[in-house]
Image (cartoon, coloured by chain):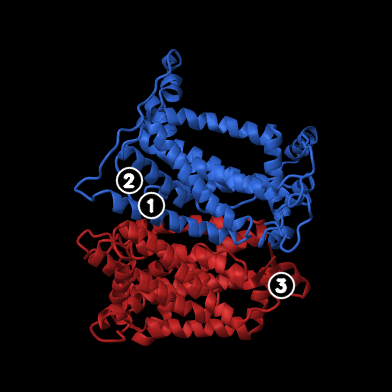
Amino acid sequence: MRLERRANVPWTLAAAAPLAAIAAALALAAGLILAAGVNPLTAYVEMLRGALGSRLSVTEMLTRAVPLMLTGLAAAVAFRARLWNIGGEGQFYVGALAVAWVGHSMISGLPPVLGIAVLMVVGMVAGALLLAGPAFLRLRFGVDEVVTTLLLNFVVILFVGLMIEGPLRDPLAFGWPQSVPVDGDFRLPDLIPRTRLHIGLPIALAVAGVVWLILARTVFGTEARAAGFNARAAEFAGVSLPRTIMAVALLSGGLAGLAGAIEVMGVTGGVTTTMSPGFGYAGIVVAMLAALHPAGVVAAAVFVATVFVGADAMSRATGVPSFIADVIVALALLTMLVALLFTSYRVRR
Amino acid sequence: MIEALDLLWNASLWAAVLRIATPLIFGVLGALLCERAGVLNLGIEGIMTMGAMVGWLSVFLGSDLWTGLLIAAAAGALMGLLHAMLTVPLGLSQHVSGLGITLFASALAYCLYRLIVEVGESPPTIEPFHPLELPVLSDIPFLGPVLFGQAAPTYLALIAVAVMAYVLNRTPLGLAIRMTGENPHAVEAQGLDPTWIRIGCVMVGSALRPGGDRAAQRAGDGDGLRHRRAGGHDGAAQPGLSRGRIRLLPRGPQGQGDRPGRGLRRPGAGRGAARLGLTCPAADARMRSRRARFTLTPRAKPRRGRGRRPRRGRTTWR
């Protein structure tokens, strides 16, 4: 048995790969649900009902999907150019913290629309700057960005802890470790009244469209993809690798920072060290499930959010531990990796 | 200030340092072995959590401590096998697969823990390893209680360091492992199969880690599995991993391998490292002479079939 690269990938196959991967992941996780003594079908029906069964649950699921879309885009952009940005979690927190810091009192008086725009830029800049460091170290000294970005996550979360215990502590939080909240004028308005769903959703969708345009229709996007496919060939073709990689890093970090900014402005108001249930890491899963395509990221984010929100309901209804959500998502990542192999290679005997 | 200095002279401080370092020693050794064989293993955190959970659980359910340690190591090896299968024969991205292993193994560990252990008021506990004072040696002032009053896993960790150093630097097997990391094609030309060397290394490396975490838990408080227990260890094991990597930087002209993304930084890498003082010409020369001293023993008979035949299709070694 050997593998042979496919000359071109039929779109049906490319579309079937994530579906097959998700099906395989659900089938594998069914074993664990069986071990818990629950019928997997009942459990999955409960999961769907918990995520999509009512107006409230759908909006809750979409609220959860918004940061996942943005961190997924961040990972997809970086991975396309073979920049292994594992630091989405850290960039998310830095963006969130910067927005809380600036948005609390520094820009009060601005009209709300302008203020929100400013805060989003602030979050993006913070995230981009955080990834610029590792990108620079890699380009200049060949330091592996996987290690630096991964470790920066821990540094940033501890830094956030320091800030919300110290200078940015919310005096009105009754000792609860929380940062000062963003000024009420600059909170994102609700999309649907009396739910948590905010206008971050259309913003994230628009961002996905813009990222798709950038990657597919601009010179920079082509250069970034070329750098990922074959760096040496790209260099021979005249692509400036350092400049391209740095630009990709700024874009990727900015997207992850934006995710943190929108989460603070839309949902939490202030920063806590537990505000992200692993959005940065889940973003990597989302990006892989989407085969690094911006449009796929939106769909994959909805899937992952469905699993996360639905698992809580399933856990309450059937007694299967809600950690099953993490198992399903992680399995989907691994099966998707294998599925990607079979879309780009065919097996020959 | 004076009190702080006094603390440094306190033998129990250093004993605690060594005790807490035990899982890190195992973790770093495991990471180092994988890295030397050319496989980046980001699954550390997950494998450690998994090993801690499985080992703890087996003791909780009635096996003895050493069996628990072995079971934990076996669970780690299983996760290592999964990672190795995905990355070596299938050639999938080592970064993404490693992250997937981390997410999967830790989620599975928490899930199993919730399934098997009733969640009560306080987490259930097991009886940990007791300190094992070596006769005579533990009577040495200061050094005695620090080095020779530890629990058994700590001794095991220190011995493992020596064994690993010896195997990697002084045996044909170690040479083959390091060679697989640096130039898999050369290994293949020697008649060895880099695929199996890598798979073996990742499995052994992954088996070491949970072994380590178990050790800490036993030697330490020995209470129930606390969530996020391996969190700090991961963060600490990564620098160890990167240190292994820095030592790999000054590879000869053919160095750096042809892993994806690595070729990108080839032009600047060497010079930058030299400027940082990371390269060491003397060490390079030493390595070269040592390489000359040890030769790989080729197989007696050229293997039929897969082994020697030039590979077709995907032969890019990562």
Label the red chain with its letter.
A
Three-letter code, disc 3: Ser
Query: Separation of disc 2 and disc 3 at Cα?
Result: 50 Å
Residue position for label 1: B109
Residue position for label 3: A240
Q: Who's the residue at 24% across and 60% down the image?
A: A176
Which tag is nearer the camera, tag 1 or tag 3? Answer: 1
| Frontmost residue, A297 versus B315 | B315
Q: Who's the residue at 65% across and 75% down the image?
A: A225
Disc 2 to disc 3: CB gap under 8 Å: no
Label the blue chain with its letter.
B
Residue position for label 2: B225
* Badge 2: chain ID: B
Three-letter code, disc 2: Leu
Question: Which element type, helix, strand or loop, lies under badge 3?
Answer: loop
Across and down, in percent, residue A184 comes to 28, 79
Disc 1 to disc 2: CB gap under 8 Å: yes
> Do tags 2 and 3 sit on the same chain?
no
In this image, B104 relative to A171: left or right?
right
In this image, B244 relative to A114: left or right?
right
Across and down, in percent, residue B301 comes to 79, 40
| Frontmost residue, B151 versus A40 | A40
Across and down, in percent, residue A227 comes to 68, 71
Q: Is residue A309 above or below residue B277?
A: below
| Frontmost residue, A98 versus A64 | A64
Query: Separation of disc 1 and disc 3 at Cα?
Result: 45 Å
